[in-house]
Image: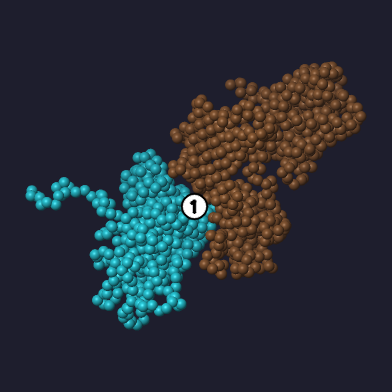
Chain colours: A cyan, B brown
Amino acid sequence: MNNETKPTDDTSAKKRWHKPTLTPHRIGSLNKFGSVSGGHYQDSFEAISIASLIEEYGSPLFVLSEQRLRNNVRKLLRAFETRYANVTYSWSYKTNYLAAVCNTLHQEGAWAEVVSAFEYEKARQLGMPAEKILFNGPHKERPILERVVAEGGRIHIDHLDELYLLEDVAKEAGKQVDVTMRLNFDTGFTEPWSRFGFNIESGQALDAARILGDSKHLNLCGLHSHLGTFILDPRAYGAQIRIMCAFMDKIELQTGCEIESIDIGGGFASMNALQGTYLPPEQVVPSMDQYAEAICTALNDATRERDMQGRGRPRLIIESGRAVVDDAEILVSSVVANKRMPDGRRSVVIDAGVNLLFTGFWYNHQVTPTRQLEGVAEDTVLYGPLCMNIDIMRASVLLPPLNVGDSMIFSNVGAYNNTQWMQFIEYRPNVVMIHSDKQVSIVRAAEDLHVMTAQESIPAHLCSLETQQDI
Amino acid sequence: MFLTPLKETLAGLFRAYGAILFAPRPWIGALFVLATFWFPNAGFSGLLAAMTGMMTAKLLKFRNLESGLHVYNSLLVGLSLGAYYMLDLHLAVLIALGAVLAVFATVAMADIAWRLGRLPILSLPFVIVALTVTLAAHSYGTLSRYLLPLAPNDGLISPFIDQFLTALGSAFFTPHPVAGLLLFLGLLITSRYLAVLAIAGFLCGFSVYAFLSGSPHPDLVAWNGFNFILVAIALGGVFTVPSLQSFALAMVGAVIAALVTSASETFMLVYGLPVMALPFLITTLTILLALTHRPASDSLQLILDAPALPEKSAERARLAMARHGEFNSVPVLAPFYGRWQVYQGFDGAHTHQAPWQHALDFYIVENGQSYHTDGASLNDYFCFGLPVLSPVAGYVVKTLDSLPDNAPGQVDLENNWGNHVLIRMSNGLCALVAHLKQGSIGVKAGAYLYAGQPMAECGSSGRSPQPHLHLHVQWGETLGLATHPFHLTTVLHQSNDPHATSPKQARFKLFSRPVEGDRITMPKMDPILVESLRLNVGREFSYQVIHNNKSANRSLSVTLNLTGQLRLTSDSGASAAFTAQDHLLAFYDRTGPADAFLDAWLLALGLMPLTDGELSWHDQPSMQLLPMTAKQRWVGKCLFPLGTGIDSRYLRQWDGEFWQQSGQHRLNFAFGMQIHAESIVTIEPRIGCRSISIKSDTGTLQATLLEVGQKADAGIPAWKIKA
Ligand SMILES: Cc1ncc(COP(=O)(O)O)c(C=O)c1O
């Protein structure tokens, strides 16, 4: 993005007239979020002008970059594959399951990580072979398990009830099913996500492994854990690997199973500012190489013995979601109105709200105007279009005055927005993708009334708006 | 019930006869038996000796009975006695004693000769025993002389040809053109190349013999001329891989044999003894023993551990060369994980100059840059600090890891190699990995490393303006000695050459010597594919095979032979050897009867990289595997008497359910004539090769898997699953 931003001060130009602004005098009003967008603007994304995009596809608008997506996953694979012999990257569908996104990543060799029947079915529909689909999550019902078992997908067991259900499904199918066990434990670096999988410290995980060891139909061959999301300290992963490998050695010895894969989940941070952190993301977010170094060093150490015995190193599976897709997508939004709040603060109403930018609840997204704004930057609230009090896109951002119709870019919106957005009050807009060759195409069309009502049906007696006599 | 042992005994007997002219097939041996009976006195004597020898070896349980090795020396003792004495009870006793002695002599001497330099014992025991027995016979008055009824010049074909055939016949103590003709036919059927060597060797040896002696006595030529023939066959066709050089060696041998023959005749005459095979043995064994002290070379390859018919050894050598590339180049693994780029190749302009011209430098480049941000600090460089693996298996000879890493752009000209690890391989050569990061070396001198073991980190010490990895193979254990050619093996090689057929596509290679700008990736093994193509001993596959509209059920099984070689054996008896390693399944050495189904398997699946992802590769399997009409086959045999390779290109893709592997196979005959075939294979995860189809100009073959099973072993029941 650096090369797309331009300096504000054009010293050669004559002083121009500025829209008058009121600036309440506050002592020490340093912006606590570091870099402020006030002085910068960005009128294009991946060399396509924002104005032309709005003209063609409307506002608000999600814009994806295929090339950034590819570069990101290549960077991840380079970082890991040059440090460890057996690396598999698996795309976490829930992060962004637009088909164009998934297929771009699948083309780069990514497997699929899904957590529901819907996501599994979508991955299959996109053509992913079942054995390259990891099926995670706490909710898997019998019918979908039956399908996954029949097709040979990779099931990650979350709890004992699922274990028993799967055992039954496998028995009925007359199959030996390879399974992975999801684990949780305390690394000492992060808040453990103990609601998923089997706990190691309490002995629950060992019990489950023993049950699997005795099972006639289930064959334990993988371990999985996901520490959480937006993990800023790579050492957490080193600890995770050591705990998982120690558990692996233990259960291999005790139950005779053979672990073929170690899945470390996702959680790598992206270049976004979490609300409540003070340093800018450039200073706190580790690079992919730093994550890879911590993980692969620990894994190479922990599996040295196996390699020496010629047993091969287990497959390392990485399910990083946000770090791969976040900066590959922006949201373009336009100003609907300017308003002065009773407390004197300036507020702007824009056409995109938290209905589209769900992650606005925990990130302070970077907001960048699309033209050089003149005037003094002022603390501004950005409100979305919803007729709801919660619809605040940025509670506080320094921006010079904007005109109605001006557009702005919310950036690093690739993760968790196109999946967690909600259909609420407004239609959801177009999502376009800028291809590697700079062609642009719609990858998800804007909703309209037809889409919105397509699933509905009206009972016969409610079809007419006439008052009904007999009810 | 009795038939099998009887058949085996007969086959062993016949093989012994065949072995005299290196012909392995029993029925050719039977033809030779027939030849010896041109003079029944000798024929019966030989048979008697052979059977005695065989029984002795069997009673004493000497190993390798079936090879006929023990028996053929006994046989020769019998033949030689039968050629000089009347066969009666006295001679029979002498023959029996000689035959028994020959068995002991063979077993005892074979072992000594093997230890001496893997030398074959050939007919040395025979000559020693025969001389002993003949000397003894001088003092036995009971024996009566026998004169072979040699009709002076029956005139079978032409005097000279007759002379050659007679000489050949005397290898079996049957110096007669008709017997010789039978033997020659057997030799011709066994190997055209051996037949050519026999003629050429006789010509060379005879010319020199005649030139030096003025006018040689025809009887001497008839009795001893076979020595020239045998020397030529052994040196040029059996114990070396056929080549121009080995042919020349064979001729030189034949000429020397002429000299040795004259000398032996003069010497032996003093004691009234026949020369027999003495010149052959002296010449062949001396030359072979001397050659074992010579460095290996591709032009003259000695194959004392695996002597074979020339057609076969030529095919083995050709396939090995096609797959491993340059002879004598040392195969090493890529010393890193992931994809790296070549910074400087062999004979590189910067520093890879003689005697260090055989060296590779690697680094990592993304979009033309080897660093991110501004490249001012070492940590900006993509490859800095990445794991470095041992490229070979061996002992660590020397390490250094105390030198600081240079700031980008700086070099340390005092310590050229910087921090390094020097590893000695079992072949005596050493591999050097240099410019490592300070303090990163995790192995110590004396430690044994396996190939692929992480041992250090990539750095920028020594003569290194930016972080990179230097790799070479060198002669000795002192740093900086002259380098030796090597190549990377089992890697994905992506060529940077814009003129290459598909520069973007990485190709799996067993021989890769990348040049500057090429990218090398350490491939990732695909465990599912490995499991799907696992060929454990006892594994059985049955297929329905439709070949040119005829359907049959056929089966393949995996067997282990006595030398520890794994083979895929078809129900027709045909088989091929294979090796299965982590990254590769490779078939070679197809033997046995014609079998279109096994050939189809070998053509379609002959070389299988077991790695992940879409993959393409080349191979040059034997031309015998290509479906051809009888006429084409004949033309092929004439054009390529020693065989040649098919240009086979393979591509494997995953189609969502199966691996689809296609192959394009082309054989260029002379005059623009070309034979072409196409193979398609489907491989099902965890089941194996589900179908094979071959389409060619001569027809189609379609094989569909019916069942996969495993033979029972002690304590392990058999199993079977339907495909
Ligand atoms: C099991 C699992 N894997 C991977 C991810 C992706 O995580 P992230 O986007 O933080 O990399 C998640 C997210 O919650 C997850 O639950």
The image quarter in which residue A363 lies: bottom left
The image quarter in which residue B4 lies: top right
**Residue A376 appears in the figure:** no
Left or right for B642, reference A305: right
Three-letter residue code for mark 1: Pro
In percent of width and height, residue B41 lies at: 79, 18
Residue shown at 24% from the left, 65% from the top = A388
**Residue A14 appears in the figure:** yes
- Mark 1 sits on what residue? A314
In percent of width and height, residue B26 lies at: 67, 25
In percent of width and height, residue B710 lies at: 50, 35
Residue shown at 68% from the left, 33% from the top = B640
Taking B309 as reference, is B366 above or below it? Answer: below
Left or right for B212, reference B612: right
Taking B29 as reference, is A291 above or below it? Answer: below
SS class, disc 1 = loop
